[in-house]
Amino acid sequence: MKNKTASAALTLFIVAAILVVVNYIVGALGFFNFRADLTENKIFTLSEGSRNIVSKLNPDKPVTIRFYATRDSRIMPQWVQSYATTVEDLLLEFQKASDGKITLEKIDPRPDTEAEDRATSDDIQGHAMNAEGGKAYFGLAIQCLQQKEIISALDPREEASLEYSIARALKKVTTTKRGVIGVMSSIPLAGPAFNFPPMMQQRQQPPWMIIQQLKLDYDVIEVPMTSGAIDANINMLLVIHPSGITEKAEFAIDQFLLRGGKVIAMVDSQCLVSQAYNTPGQMGAPPTNNVGPNSDLKQLFKSWGVTYDVNMVVADMTYRTNTQGRAVPTFLTLDRNGINRDEPFSSSLDIVQLFAPGSFVMEKRDGITATTLLQSSENSELIDSAAAEKARSQGLSTFQPSGKKQSLALRLNGNFKTAFPDGPPKEKEPAEGAGLKLPGGKGGEEKKNAGAPAIAPEVKADAKPAFLKESQNKDGVVFLFSDVDMFYDMFCFESDPSGRPMAIARNSNAPLLLNIVEMLSGGIDLISVRSRAVTKRPFTKMEELKAQVESEYRPLIEQRNQKLTDIVQKIATLGGVKQEKGMVVLNINQEQRKQLIDEQIAIKTDIRNLQKEQNKKKDQRESIITALNLLVVPLLVIAFGLMIALRRRSLQAAH
């Protein structure tokens, strides 16, 4: 008996020892560190873009990643240490994929140590965590030769974009040339933007966050709305809300495209941001800016075969967005069905939101191919701007689905022809205050000779200036968006408690634009990494079911609302005046008025009952879906267990 007990104890000790050794080899040393990623989008697996970036690293120029994480539990909170493990796992994946081209150094900076001095020299941000002043460090330094990128503080809230941050840093330390992006807009994208109250007027609005994001990787310069030509150094042009654009500026865009430049244009049927820019200041002061409510590129759209009505807005009952307790049909939240996932820059995006967008219709043009990138559902229709304005606060009293999907964003490819076959348009007086000013900008009128046509040789004064009539190559590309607001800070980035935007995407809007810019600049490997930044996904099936229920009850409720309107009008017509004893008094048929009021109350009660039935039906369908989600998996497990039990019994019976 004693021998058996001793043998069992020895066996238990050996097993425990083996587990400790294996855990150390796999966990601490990283050997045989295998993980199975069973998520739908493989969000815990190194993306193809990251692997491509790593595979292109030069073996003669190795990259060193210094990972600083204070491990002292008295200084670093446990939840941050847990995230540090996640970061370390991802860094090990990068190191494994590099085949020796990446060296990972794990450093634990504790107070008053050489490791803390190294963290300070690498500009890693230290945070005081206790009364003694002990600082915790949690960041990355990525270096290749003399180039170094710093992530001074890793934020657990930005876990979804962690891989992109590392991949982007790797790309930056191994690349020396920066692309040049021009920005043309009627909006002062770099501020001062809004009319603050008097005590806040000394504050200026910083550049839009999307501009700040672009400036991290590119040289971003101004292109005034009065430009007659685009600087030859610019290889990509962002045209953002070109309200009141002149033919001269359209000609500049036209020639830029024909000589091989890439264009991303954003127009708007109802620009909500412009309303904020134009809001009068305090005490009735006039607005400091004059930004038009809508924008268009008439000449260029006509040449490209694009039809766009600046007075019409898309309303969609399937993709409508809930905001402040109200479903707004002109604020669209597109799910995967509304996003073209066949394109590399949008293949992994989940949610794109648009705010009072317009619609594009593409006519056939020889040599030009149009691809729809974003589209509404069939449960949508076009409404005028006035109805769209009203729909934001009151909803739509009438809605007739068109039965077809509206194109909200397009990509045009091919051989473009000029929109100005007769040459440059005649000079016109520039609009006062047109254009924007970006901090540190080098373009526009401040740069010498920037206004001279970059494609034209020197000509005589009496000769017509040279211009291109069609693309110099067959690879012209234009991206079109029917909404500008979708890229404004409050609509695509999270905010801190003080209301300032943070570089944390609230949807896929910013990743979509940055993906496109990345692709056009030749850095397609980063696209699949950045696309994973947003992991929120809407319960689209539930929204579809709710929309179906509402479509059943909407005609009944609208019919009764119309009766209420008729009754109100009848009550108003009952009133009259007459003179009695020299006094003017109301002449109202009280009996008829009471009858109408009773009828009014009955109809309101009927409407409330219909709404209750509608909500009850919604709740029933929601309960069914929820029950199925909760029961299906357990039932499958039980069924699988029963199958195994029956098979085992049959095998035992056979023996």
Image (cartoon, helix red, strand yellow):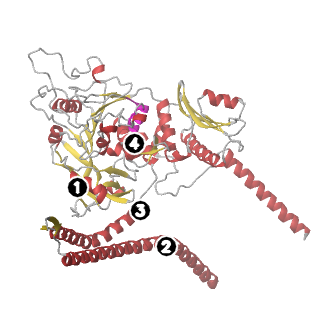
Q: Earlier in the sequence, mark 4 or mark 3?
A: 4
User: At label 1, which amino acid type do we have?
Assistant: Ala
The answer to whether one can see residue 99 in this image is: yes
Q: Split into 4 quadrants, where in the image is the C terminus?
A: bottom right
Mark 1, Cα crowd under 10 Å, few <14 / some 14-19 / many 20+, is: some
On the rendered structure, is 183 left or right of 645? left
Question: Which residue does the image show at 24% across and 73% down from the upper left?
Answer: 560
Whether residue 345 is situated above or below residue 596 in the rendered picture: above
Q: Earlier in the sequence, mark 1 or mark 4?
A: 1
C-alpha gap between disc 2 and disc 4 = 41 Å
Give SS at disc 3.
Answer: loop
Q: Which residue is mark 1?
A: 387
Mark 2, Cα crowd under 10 Å, few <14 / some 14-19 / many 20+, is: few
**Magenta-colored span:** 203-219
Whether the residues at callouts 1 and 3 have beta carbons within 8 Å, the answer is no
- Please state the horizontal and vertical placement of residue 473, each as a whole percent of the image: 22, 33
User: At label 2, which amino acid type do we have?
Assistant: Val
Give SS at disc 2.
Answer: helix
Question: Which residue does the image show at 55% across and 78% down from the upper left?
Answer: 643
Whether the residues at callouts 2 and 4 have beta carbons within 8 Å, the answer is no
Give SS at disc 4.
Answer: helix
The answer to whether one can see residue 281 in this image is: no
Q: Which residue is mark 4?
A: 489
Q: Which residue is mark 2?
A: 632
Front in this rendered view, residue 44 or 230: 230
